[in-house]
Amino acid sequence: MTPQGQFTVVAPIAADREPQLRSLLLTMNAAPGIADPGNDIVPFAQFPQLHFARFVILDDPTLGDIEVYGLARPRLPIYLAFIGDCDGAAADCLADMVATAAAGLRRVFGFCTDFQPDGDLLAWLRAHDLPIAASYVNWVGRTVRQIKQESALQQVLSARVDRTPLESPDDARTRWREMVNFVRTEVDSRRLTLTPPDPTPLSWLLAKWMNLVVSLLVSLLAMPFLLVLSPLLILQLRRLERSDPEICPRPASDLLVELQTLEDQDVTNQYTAFGSGKPGVFRRWLITVVFAVIQFTARYLFTRGYLGRVQTIHFARWVFVDNKRRVLFTSNYDGGHQAYMDDFINKVAWGLNVAFSSGIGWPHTDFLLARGARRESCFKYFQRRHQLPTQVWYKAYPGLTLCDMECNARIRQGLERHDLSAAQALEWLKLL
């Protein structure tokens, strides 16, 4: 199994050069916000391990919201973020990109304040690759290669399978065997490729289980203190929940039009949100702990197609920016934007509250879990107001949803079985 990696390269843009950068990024697209896979600047399709990638300018329109706490609007830079989800180590993916697209990457990051045109590009990218506070991978180990090969397999079998009515239950097994023999012939003749998974890296396994042991030990050591302090922590949380301002105005119509122009170009969409965290030590510690819990559950529990009860997210991440003053959230999800938000409201609204209620202006919550995102209009206004237009977005397998990938994987698994019952063979044929 090949585990997935993620990189989040963030660098400040020179103030007078942002318009030129936006113009350059536009030349990378084949449609509004959708990257041309073979564009001359960063030809994403040449990197077989890359699932998703994006360039997005982090220009925070809500930066002044902190003034509701009596604090001055901070002077923080506008950033360029280069974000990717890949198979294998993110550092290796960045190295491959530098080896192939160094000239284009230098053009893009040449608009950043601390970039040296003649410097070590890979070292610079790695130095600006921010740590990920929490991340989610829909199916750990499902590679781009596997997705594309299984999609090709499904297309070949779908065109080949006999679709006449079955005369007896045993006919299903006969047709399954015919497909097994057909695929073997196609693979032997190299017209089809079904590469077996690579061995799981030992270093990744050791790091994963070491992290588990350390996390459990830290939790056990912290538990007595949390139990003793819990009444005080709950009282402080309730005090802040009652006093924290709520900022959920209707988003500007021009922002909505811009965002909607970039959406629904494919069965999968991108989402980028950016905003400031609520001030104070309590909120900072709370969001740090929350992200640690999200990272733990995503790493050990939600690794096979589900994030809670939500099944539409390919990849997601939370990243601290500006010394935890702001948080960047990105995701890649199937379906339309409204359906994406409704899915969360209906299934895991409490999870939204836990993950995002430390952001300035979040709809009022009760004891962290209740209300908040359940107040549909306020939540939807809030998330749209913090959403940023993504200038360039790449997907390695257009037209494929997570449901398609799961179906295609089951088709392959059925072919690799030694035998199927008549009922199992019938269910397998229904996948084609």
Image: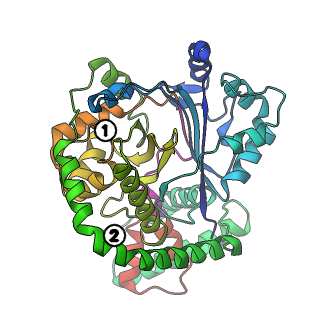
In front: 377, or 314?
Answer: 377
Q: Residue at x 84, y 28 (%)?
A: 118
Q: Residue at x 37, y 76 (%)?
A: 223
Whether the magenta-drawn stretch holds residue 406 is answered as yes
Please, what secondary structure does the residue beneath circle 2 have? loop
Q: Quadrant of residue 312?
A: bottom left
Whether the magenta-drawn stretch holds residue 83 is answered as no
Q: Which residue is mark 2?
A: 165
Inspect the image, locate mark 2, and give the three-letter code of the amino acid beneath it: Pro
Alpha carbon distance from label 1 to label 2: 60 Å
Q: Quadrant of residue 368?
A: bottom left
Q: Earlier in the sequence, mark 1 or mark 2?
A: 2
Residue 369: percent from the left, percent from the top?
A: 21, 58
Q: Give the vertical position of 185 relative to 168 (above or below).
A: above
Q: Which residue is mark 1?
A: 360
Q: Give the vertical position of 254 relative to 6 (above or below).
A: above
Q: Few, some or many C-alpha atoms within 10 Å of disc 2 (few <14, some 14-19, many ≥20)?
A: few
Q: Few, some or many C-alpha atoms within 10 Å of disc 1 (few <14, some 14-19, many ≥20)?
A: many
In the picture, the quarter occupied by the N terminus is: bottom right
Disc number lying in front (1 or 2): 1
- In the image: residue 110, left or right of residue 130: right
Q: Is residue 5 visible?
A: yes
Magenta extent: 392-408
Residue 209: percent from the left, percent from the top?
A: 58, 77
In the picture, the quarter occupied by the C terminus is: bottom left
Q: Residue at x 21, y 28 (%)?
A: 249
Q: Is residue 312 visible?
A: no
